[in-house]
Amino acid sequence: MAALAVAGMLLSGGLWISSGASPRAAAAPPAENLTIQQWLSGREALQIELNNTLVETRQLTAPSSQATTICQKLARVSQQLLHSGRSPHPHLDTAANAGITQFTKAAQACLAGDLSLTRRQIDDGTTLRADAQDTLDQLLHGDHGGH
C-alpha cells in the first residue's frame, strides 16, 4: 500500500512538473516571419520611389512635358505597388496598400492637367496611409487589439 502511495505521489508530482514546467511558447509576431520580411523588402524600393514621386508631383505648378513624365511615373509606381503580389499574411495587403488607389487617381488627374485635383488625391491618399500605419504596425507585431 505504501508503494502505491509513493507511486501516486511521484506520478502526480511528475504530471504537475511536466504540465507546469514548460509553458507553451508564444508564436513569433508576423514581423519576424522571413516570408513577410522578404515581401516587405521586395516593396521597399517601390515605396521609396512612390514617396519621391509624390513629392515631385505635389510640387508641379503647371502642365508641361516634365509634369507628364512625373505623372506617368506616379501612375507606374502606384500600379506596381497595387499589383506587386499578395502578402503572405491576411489583412496585410489592405493596410500596406492604403491610399495607393488615390495616388493612381492623382496620376490620372495629373495626366489630364488637373493639378488641383491631383494634390487633393495625393492628400487623401497620404491621410489614408497615415491612418493605416497603426493597423500595419499592429499586424506586423502580432497585436491585433481585438481585431
Image (cartoon, helix red, strand yellow):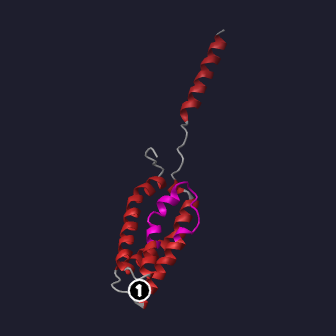
- Of 126 and 27, nearer the camera is 126
Q: Residue at x 41, y 86 (%)?
A: 67
The residue lying furthest to the bottom in this view is 65
Q: Looking at the picture, which amino acid does disc 1 mark?
A: Ala
Q: Is residue 64 magenta?
A: no
Q: Is residue 111 above or below residue 86?
A: below
Name the quadrant of the N terminus.
top right
Q: Position of residue 97 (x, y in %)?
A: 48, 64
Give the magenta-colored segment's residue range: 81-104
Circle 1 is placed at which residue position? 67
Q: Is residue 59 above or below residue 95?
A: below
Q: Position of residue 118 (x, y in %)?
A: 38, 76
Q: Residue at x 55, y 60 (%)?
A: 36
Whether residue 37 sits left or right of residue 110 in the image: it is right
Q: Position of residue 87 (x, y in %)?
A: 56, 61
Q: Is residue 137 above or below residue 121?
A: above
